[in-house]
Image: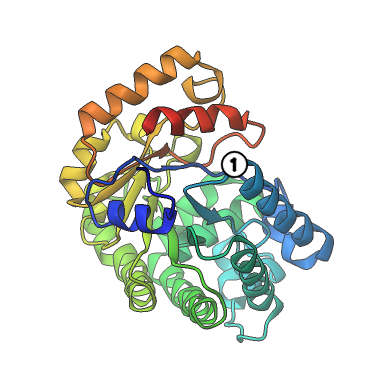
Amino acid sequence: MLYENKKELLQLVLNNKSAERIPIGFWWHFAHGDDLIFGYKSVKTIRSIIEAHKKMYDVFSPDFMKIMSDGFFAHPSLIENNVTSISDISKVKPIHKNHPWIREQVAMVAELSNYVGKNIMLFYNIFSPLQSIRLNVKYLGGDAEAFQDMAVKYPEKLIKICEIIASDYALLAEELKNNTSIDGIYYSVQNLQHKKVDKLFHENYVMPIELNLLNQLNSFWEYNLLHICGYDHFKNKLDYYTKYKAKAYNWAVHTDKVSLKEGKRLFDSAVIGGFDNNQGTLLDSGSLDDIEMFVHQLIKETGREGLILGADCTIPSDIDITRLKFIRSIAK
């Protein structure tokens, strides 16, 4: 008999064990463009994001749910001070727990937690401080490379700002822990995309900030997931993250060219993924026969223990959900 309690099902798998069926996990954005950054300022936008989550839950009936942080992508002090260059960095200041950016997130997550109930595990998306700055510079400045240059030329200055942002993310996490029933955080990180950044640079400047926040998240919840983001085909060196302790790891299998089997061996933990998330690939455009063949091959290659079928990153928001349900039926 298959598990009816999806929370028990996922906990087994996240503890790197084999369950009676293999769970799946897919998610997509409910806001786009400027709304990803500025959405928290609009009651209407946040309301639409909440209702879209509820619709997804009702229609898809997911094995677990990642609540998207759409509308809250960047730290408010970055936004309010229009931080797009190193000269703006000194303007960034910490916020307090009653700031709308924190309170609106907590309210959104609490409402969705209450709506979904206790039968499935819930995770909320939090970006690493560097990711928060990168996304802010990209959306406000329109220059994806500006952040990478900033990080390499002025790492000490950037890290000081990261400490402020990390502290506020820890504050957000504590409020989520105290006021919602989520089961953990989906923590998004990414290699600095610059040819001058090597593992030593990562360990000296990036890892201390990211690990400090992750350790705080791990003190709040037993089940946290690490997402090594390869969106837009950004490449990551996965060995940079072997000291980042999480219950499961998710990365861009098709961009990084590291299989789930290899990643499971590298992290000695449960893994999430398998499908390319980009439009025009097998997930949203391939035949059902090809999808079925791919799922069987993925399970055979990776093994059933600690396996959650999903994608490299967020999938197209207009995907036909019956395709995702089909994957779940095959995984059974």
Using the image as rendered, state which of residue 219 and residue 332 is in the foreground. Answer: 332
What secondary structure is marked by label 1? helix
For the image, the number of numbered tags is 1
Determine whether 62 is above or below 261 in the image: below
Using the image as rendered, state which of residue 65 and residue 169 is in the foreground. Answer: 65
Q: Residue at x 38, y 45 (%)?
A: 194
- Quadrant where the image shows the C terminus: top left
Q: Tell whether 137 sits left or right of 11.
A: right
Determine whether 52 is above or below 117 in the image: above
Residue 292 at what x, y percent from top left? Answer: 40, 19
Visible in this render: residue 276? Answer: no
Residue 308 at what x, y percent from top left? Answer: 35, 43
Q: Residue furthest right?
A: 44
Crowding at label 1, few (<14), some or many (≥20) Cα neighbours within 10 Å? Answer: some
Which residue is label 1 attached to? 60
Residue 215 lies in quadrant: bottom left
Give the amino acid type for the residue marked by disc 1 in the picture.
Phe
Q: Tell whether 77 sits left or right of 241.
A: right
- Quadrant where the image shows the N terminus: top left
Q: Which residue is drawn at 73% across and 65% down?
A: 40
Q: Which residue is drawn at 62% across and 74% down?
A: 106
